[in-house]
Image (cartoon, coloured by chain):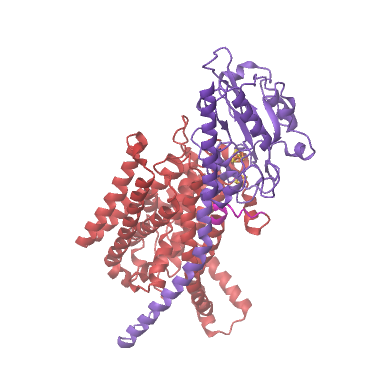
Amino acid sequence: MTISRRNFLKVAGAAGGVLLAGGAASAQGAQAPETSAGGVEFNGMLIDTTKCIGCRACEEACNEANKLPKPKVSFSTESVFEETRDTTTGAFTVVNRFPNEKKPDAPIFVRKQCMHCNQPACASACLCRAMEKTKEAAVIYHKDRCMGCRYCMVACPFDIPRFEYNSPTPFVWKCIFCNERQKKGEQPACSEVCPTGATLFGKKRDLLEIAKTRIYTEPDKYVHKIYGEHEVGGTGWLFLMGAPEEKLGLKTNLPTTPYPELTSGFLYGVPLVFVLWPSLLIGLNYLIKDSKVDEKKEGSHGEHD
Amino acid sequence: MANTTDAAAASTEGTMTFRQVARETIRFVLSELKPKGKMLTPFNVITGGIILSGLVMIAIRFAYGLGAVSNLSQNYPWGIWIGFDVVTGVAFAGGAYVLCFVVHILKIKKFEPIIRVTVLNGFLAYVFYAGALLLDLGRPWNVINPIIGNAFGLSSVLFLVAWHFLLYMICEFLEFSPVVAEWLHWPRARRILEGLSTGAVIFGITLSTLHQSGLGALFLLAPTKVHPLWYSGNIPVMFFVSSIFAGLSMVMIESFFTQKAFKDRIGHDLHAAHDSILLGLGKGAVGALFAYIFLKLIDFVHYKQWIYLDTPMGYWYLFEIVGFVLLPTALFLQAIRKRSAKLVQFTAFLTAAGVILNRLNVSVIGFKWYETVRYYPSVMEIWITLAIISMELWVFRWVILRMPVFGEAHEVVEEKTAEDMEVVTWKASVL
Ligand code: SF4
Ligand code: SF4
């Protein structure tokens, strides 16, 4: 027990160090990732995979709250767990079942949906600002602006945005963190109906604290890592894992860099090139023109059209 | 043709009112729109068929959505329309900015005879490939959003690329416009336009640098999706450098076919200088290739990618580097040493194939290489791409046959039959 506790502290300490180093390396990373640029505390969601019983009440609530088309098989059909499902244009969240190696008779259920990244790749990719991070946390979608280029899909590290390929006037669909409900002071539909508290809504800072306490008090039950704390610079949704992430269908190879920083270097160079290139080219042009005129004075009059 | 000379004579007198000029011009343009030569050549029949059936498929795409014609999926949002038409096609259009730099900035006269045809090709490539981009957009009518400014995605590389495409097309049109003015017999307009073109050239080179590298920078946002052997923080620089030799190779390939297809439109200057121009282009390409190899080497050391070499993707990577970067470099060097224009031309084909391979590896083949169900283009996707290339060839031929692209301004050229213009071979075989 004590050993794993000490290990956990070591991991937490190391992670903190990484965060600090990252903050020092980039101006953007320096601000606390739990708040938006305006200083508003981000809302978040804590998913405790050990508490989820796979009832899919969240899926059903999401379907109703977002007025999505009813699925072919009902929300109480268990056979859906036989294959790993993905979100679709009509299902913003899905629950999947994974085998539990420690306790074979108690499989682990894991939800999948948009992670509402602190600095979302989708929003930084979108050239029409159709994907937008609100100051409260939600990454929402403006239908009227989108031009359907699907760059958000290319960029999203979690493969979340879904596109209507079979419509002449297609949209992109994904979880929008029940933004309208949040604005009214309500919590998202899925966390409201969750009967076991496996999906917990709150301020992200508080949720992180809860998650850390849970790992600390029950170190054998959890993997000593909060998925989403550092991935791609931190996400709004946090996962407590009953098994290592690779066993739960979560992406394992994500960098801790916030995605917008991957292109910011290039974009900073743009104005530079815009100033430097023309001046260099004009200068070069004059220089060479002058030397050619000198040459011509001596030579014949080979005037070119 | 009678109209032409009338209009020419009238406009040089300078006594016509604006309305008369406009009327004459419209009549002239209408007469020029008629196709020249025989209609039923193999080239016309094949490409015409491809274009017509392609148009039907485009109609299906707009009526039923992208899924009706393409194999795109939630896992593969971008297919060959982006990976080939845009990312590869624009690289090949790079010849225009490279030659503009050489001719207009460095004032190297030697390449002047081919500058017009190269700019024309660059311009058409942009018009048609950027046009192809509209097919790929789910909601193309919203493409004006980032332009008119009700939604500026300033943090997006794609925003930059979109704007640059637009501005660059205008620049290239300006660069080419004196030729159009010559064709329309507007000497005054021609003089004004020529004055503008230095500015257009400088602006055009700047824009090209940025969007050629910008196309690569698009993929910076997919660090876990592009195969590690191709992903690198240097993609933008590599895309820029490879657009130089891609563009130059395309110019050499073009000259290979135009020399055959438009033999009698090509001026004596160009005929005489042809070999030495080719060798010069080869030298330029070798320089860029060396820079590229150097970049690849730095990358390889920096990202410690050798652990991936002993995998199927690794072999594929080696195939690309050895066969289509190192080999062309060696062949170009050999060709320059032996002063063999033939070998330069052959190597240009090899280099172009390498560029296609590389761009597809970044954007399609190496993209999400780990998925079990992979994307491959549907027949209709390929067909529509062929249709777009065919349309470009038709327009290209139309312009070449009418405007003084090969530098025989003001001469009255007798009409030619289109029989020997089997242009289709050149792009179809390369692209
Ligand atoms: S998970 Fe993907 S779609 Fe959701 S906010 Fe992050 S980048 Fe955007
Ligand atoms: S598909 Fe729409 S939301 Fe996604 S990047 Fe393109 S314009 Fe933005």
The answer to whether one can see residue B360 in this image is yes
Specify the colour of chain B.
red
Q: Report the image quarter containing ligand 2.
A: top right
Q: Is residue B232 above or below residue B373?
A: below
| Residue under the image location 51 percent in, 81 percent down | B9
In the rendered image, the residue lying farthest to the bottom is A297
Percent position (x, y) of residue B371? 47, 32
Q: Nearer the viewer, residue B197 or B256?
A: B197
* Image side of residue B18 versus residue B339, left or right: right
The image quarter in which residue B102 lies: bottom left
Give percent across and percent down for residue B135. 56, 47
| A61 w.r.t. B217: above or below | above
Decide whether residue A16 is among the magenta residues. Answer: no
Residue A24 image offset from top left, x and y in percent: 53, 49
Total number of numbered labels? 0
Q: Is residue A200 above or below residue A165?
A: above
Chain A: what color? Answer: purple
Q: Residue furthest right?
A: A184
Query: Which image quadrant is residue A228 in?
Result: top right
Is A235 rendered above or below residue B125?
Answer: above
State the extent of the magenta-drawn residues as a range: B151-160
Q: Residue furthest front?
A: A2
The x and y percentages for residue A91 are: 65, 30
Q: Is residue B174 left or right of residue B257?
A: right
Residue extending farthest top = A105
Q: Is residue B2 visible?
A: no
| Magenta stretch prevailing secondary structure | loop
Left or right, A176 with respect to A11, comes to right
Q: Residue B357 versus residue A243: which sits nearer the camera? A: A243
**Nearer to us in this view, B236 or A292:** B236
